[in-house]
Image: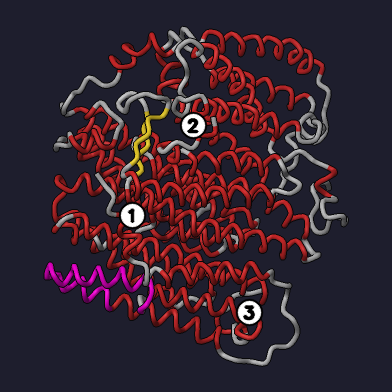
Amino acid sequence: MRCVKMKGSEASGKRRHISLLSLLSLVMLAGLSAALAWAFLTPGPDPLGLAHRVDAALAESGVESRVTAVLLNYRAYDTLLECFVLFLGVAIVWSLQPSRPVRQEPRVDPVLSSLVRLLVPLMVLVGGYLLWAGSSQAGGAFQAGAILGAAGVLLILTSSRLLSTMPKGLLAWGICLGLFFFLAVAVGAVALGGNFLEYRRSSATMIIIALEVVAAFSIGLSLAVFFGGSRPEEPSERTAAGRPPHGEGEEP
Amino acid sequence: MMGLLLKNDCWLIWPFVLPLFGALLSFLFKQRPRLPGLIVALLTTLSSGVLAWKLVRHGVGRYDLGGWQPPLGISLRGDGPAVLMVLMTAVTGLAISIYAGGYFRSRIAKVEDERRHIIQERFFWPLWLLLWGALNGLFLSADIFNMYITLELVALSSVGLTVLSGKPASQVAGMRYLLVSILGSLSFLLGVGFLYKAFGSLDLATIQAALSFSPPVAMAMALISVGLLLKSALFPFHFWLPPAHANALAPVSAILSGLVVKGSWYLFFRFWLGFLPLIGDGGNAVMAALGGAAIIWGAFQAFSQQRLKMLVAYSTVAQIGYLFIIFPLTGAGAGPAASAVFYFAISHSCAKAAMFLAAGTIFLQMGHDRIRDLAGVRQLLPITSFAFALGGLSLMGLPPSGGFIAKYMYLSMAVSQDRWWLVLLIVIGSGLTAAYIFRAVSHILSPKMVHGQGQVVVAPCMEWSALALALVAILLGFIAPLPLALLGVTG
C-alpha cells in the first residue's frame, strides 16, 4: 500500500482496489490464525507420541542422542531424501542460465582475507566438533554442513573465482559423494541380508558417524554452491559437439 | 548376495532407488547424460513391472525401512492402487524418456543455440530421474511425513524442469508454480503436524484406524485437503497450471500433465477415503461441484485457445475434474469407485502424455503451435498426427479406449445410484472435450501443400514413442480386466 501512495494521485482507483484486496487478505489471515489457534488450543486426544518408543530403542540405535537416532537410524530414509532435496537444489541452480559471479573482481581486502585465513580453519574445527558431538548431544551432519557451507561462502567472497577454477567435475563429484555413500550403505544393508538402511547393531555407531562425516561434507559443498550461483565453467562443455558455441556465452 | 537383492519384498525399493542412482549418474556423466538416463529408465520400468507381477503373485507387500516397525520407523506399502500408479509412471515415463532422447538430439542438431540445448539436456536427465524416483516413493509410502518429503521432491524437480526451457514465459510460470507448490506443501506439512499431535503416529494406516473427530483433526483435514488441491490444480486452484505446462519443453509438458498432477491427486484420494466417515456427503458434494466446474470451465478455455500446447494444458484442467467428481459415488463402497477413477487416471496419463509429446513434435517441426496455421502437419508428420488424434479419442471417451471404459464405469455407477446430474455432467463434459479435440485435429489433419522441409529433422523415436503411448491408451480399452485385477489386490 505504501508504495502505491508514493506513486502519487495518478491511480486512486487502483489504490482503492489494492487496499480492498489487502483488507480482504488481512481478514482471511485473521480467520486462519483464529482457526489454527482453536485447533491447537482445544484439548483433543493426547497420545503418548513416539518419545517413549525412541527412548526404548535407543540402546539398539548405536548413538546416545535421540535426535541423531531418529535422523540417521529410525527415519534415515527421510534424511536420505532430504539430502536429495539439496542435490536437487544444486542441479536447478546450475541449470538456470549462468549468473555472474558474486563479485566480479577479487578486490583483495587485507582485513577480510586475514580474517578469513583465521576463521576458516576454526570453522572446519567447529564443524568437526559438531559432527563428533552429534552422537551424544545436539549436533550432527546438517549443523556441521551449515558451518562448512559458511566457511565456503567466506572463501568465495575472498576469491571469487574459487568455484569456477576448481578442477573439472570435482565439485559435482563432491556434491554427489554423500548421496552415493548413503545409497551404498542403504543397498549394502540389503545385500547383507537386512532391510534397506538397516544397520547391524555392532556396527551401527561406525556407520552413522561415517554417514554423518560424508554427508556433512556434501551438504557444506552444496550450500556454498547455492551462494556461488553459477555453474563452474568447463572448457569441455563448450566443445562437446566439436563445434564452437553459438548464441549467448557464459563469459562476457 | 544378488539373491538377497532380488528377494520378494525387495522389489518395493527398486522403483525409487534405481532412478535416484540414475539421477546422480546422469548428473556426473555430463558429457553424455542420455546414456545412463535411458538405461536407468529402462531398468526402472522393468523393476516396476516385476513389482506388479510380485503383487499379483504374493499379495500386498510391506517393507519396513531400516528394519524398524511402523510407529517408530517408516514403512512402504505396495497395494493395488500404489503399484498401479507405479506401473503407470513406468509406462508413460519410459515412452517420455525415449522421446526425450530423440527430442534433445534433434534440437542439438539444429546449429543455432546448440550449447543451450546441450545444457538443457544435461540437466533434464537428473531432474527427470529424480522426479520419477520421488513419484514412485510417494506412491509406495505409508508414512505421512515421508509423503511430505516425496511431495516436496516432486514439486521442486517439477519446477526445475518447468524453467529448463529458459524462455521468460516459462520462468514466470515456473516461479508462480514454485510459490503455489510451496504453499501447498506447507499447508500439507502443517496438517501432518496436527495429525501427529492428535494420534502420536505418522503411519497413515494407524491414523486412519484411530480417526475420530476433534478440532485438531478437523484442522488437519482442511489443511491437507487444501494443500493437495492446490498442487492438483482443481478448478479454483488451476490458475498456475496452463502457463507452466504449456511453456515447458515438450517432454517436460508430458511429464507434468501426465504424471505429476496424479501424484498429489493420489495422496488426496488416499487421505480423503480415510477421512470419509468424518466428512460425509457435504464434503463429497463440494468436491463434485469443483470437479464439475473444472470440467466445464477447462473445456471452454481449451476451446478458445489459439496455441496447441495451451489447448492441451487447459484440457488437463478439465480432465482433473473427472478425478474429483468420483467422490459422491464412493457412498456405495469405495472399491468400484476406486476402480473407475484409477482407470481414468491411467488412461488420461497415457493419452495426455501422448498428446503433449505429439504437440511438442509439431512445435519442433513447424516452429510454432498456432492451431489455425497447422494445416499440412499431416503430410509432414503423419505418425505424430495420428498419435495426437488417437490420444484425443481416449480423452473424449470414445470406444474402444481406456477413457471409454473409465467413463462407462462412472456412468453405470451414477445411474445405479440415481445421480442423474452426474450423468448429465459427464455427457456434457465429453461433448465439450470432443469439440475442442475436433477443433485441433481438424486443422492438423487438413491437407495443404507444404513448401520446404520444415524446421528440423524429427527423430523417428519421437514420433513412434508418442504413437506407442496413444496406442496404450487405446489398448487399455481392450485389456481392462488386467489393470482392474491389479487394482483389486488390497488388504
Q: Residues within 10 Å of mark 2 (few under 14, many from 20)?
A: some
Q: Relative to A243, does residue B292 appear above or below in the rendering?
A: below
Instruction: Read off the chain for label 1.
Output: B
Q: Same chain for labels 1 and 2? Say yes or no.
A: yes
Q: Which residue is mark 2?
A: B4
Q: Which residue is mark 1?
A: B486
* Among the 4 quarters of the image, the one containing residue B218: top left
Q: Same chain for labels 3 and 2? Say yes or no.
A: yes
Instruction: Read off the chain for label 2.
Output: B
The front one of A64 and B9 is B9
Q: Which residue is mark 3?
A: B381
- Is B402 one of the magenta-colored residues? yes
Q: Return the x and y of residue B428 as percentages of the image width and height.
A: 28, 78
Q: Relative to B25, does residue B71 appear above or below in the rendering?
A: above
For image coordinates 74% across by 23% down, the residue present is A155
Q: Which residues are magenta?
A: B399-427
Q: Same chain for labels 3 and 1? Say yes or no.
A: yes
For image coordinates 76% across by 18% down, the residue present is A112
Q: Nearer the viewer, mark 1 or mark 2?
A: 2
Figure disc tally: 3
Q: Return the x and y of residue B18 as percentages of the image width and height.
A: 55, 41
Instruction: Read off the chain for label 3.
Output: B
**CA–CA distance between discs 3 and 1?**
36 Å
Q: Return the x and y of residue B249 as percentages of the image width and height.
A: 60, 61
Of callouts 1 and 2, which one flags the residue occurring earlier in the amino acid sequence?
2
Q: Which mark identifies residue B317? A: none
Left or right of A17? Residue B109 is: right
The front one of B351 and B185 is B351
Q: Amino acid at mark 1?
A: Leu
Contact between labelled residues 1 and 3, with CB atoms less than 8 Å apart: no
